[in-house]
Image (cartoon, rainbow, N blue to C red):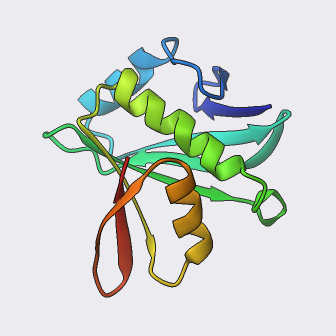
Amino acid sequence: QISIIPSNSLLFPKNALYTANISALEEMMKKKKEEYSLAVRVNGVFAGEGVFHNFDIFGNIELGIRLLREFQGKGIASCAVVAMNNYAKNILRAKSVKMKCFLQNTASECMIKKAGFAEVSRDDNFIFFEG
């Protein structure tokens, strides 16, 4: 089981429509905090971190994720990104959910596409996606 656990330790199972922690995220947005970090756990074991960041007044949110090496390449990141994307769209009502990765990071590029994001542009350093 893959879980995403916010800083107040409420447990969110993957692919759930998260209603329990909306007040914490709303409060964070009111305080204009620029980042909201979540623990990614697999069967209760810490596997990495998911992050909501770069909130703006237009309703855009950027997602980020990083996993410990031993949890990479197992589909955990894409599952967590799908859950975070669902939360951003269905609960936070984000108009746009974005991700990016370095051009040379083909593993991240594949994971982001697997999670349902489409490439929208590139620059000299990054590939930009929208989900």
The residue located at (45%, 38%) in the rendering is 85
The residue located at (45%, 81%) in the rendering is 103
Q: Position of residue 61 (x, y in %)?
A: 31, 44
The quarter holding residue 24 reads top left
- Residue occupying the far top of the picture: 20
The residue located at (52%, 12%) in the rendering is 20
- Residue occupying the far left of the picture: 58
Where is 4 relative to 72, above or below?
above
Q: Position of residue 52 (x, y in %)?
A: 43, 44
From the viewer's side, name the closer residue of 128 and 92: 128
* 108 to the left or right of 103: right
* 116 to the left or right of 76: left
* 92 to the left or right of 39: left
Whether residue 105 is visible to the viewer of this picture, yes or no, is yes
Q: Is the N terminus in the top left, top right, bottom left or bottom right quadrant? A: top right
* 31 to the left or right of 78: left
Where is 52 relative to 86, above or below?
below
From the viewer's side, name the closer residue of 107 and 7: 107
The residue located at (64%, 31%) in the rendering is 5
Whether residue 48 is visible to the viewer of this picture, yes or no, is no
Q: Position of residue 30 (x, y in %)?
A: 25, 28
Q: Position of residue 25 (x, y in %)?
A: 40, 26
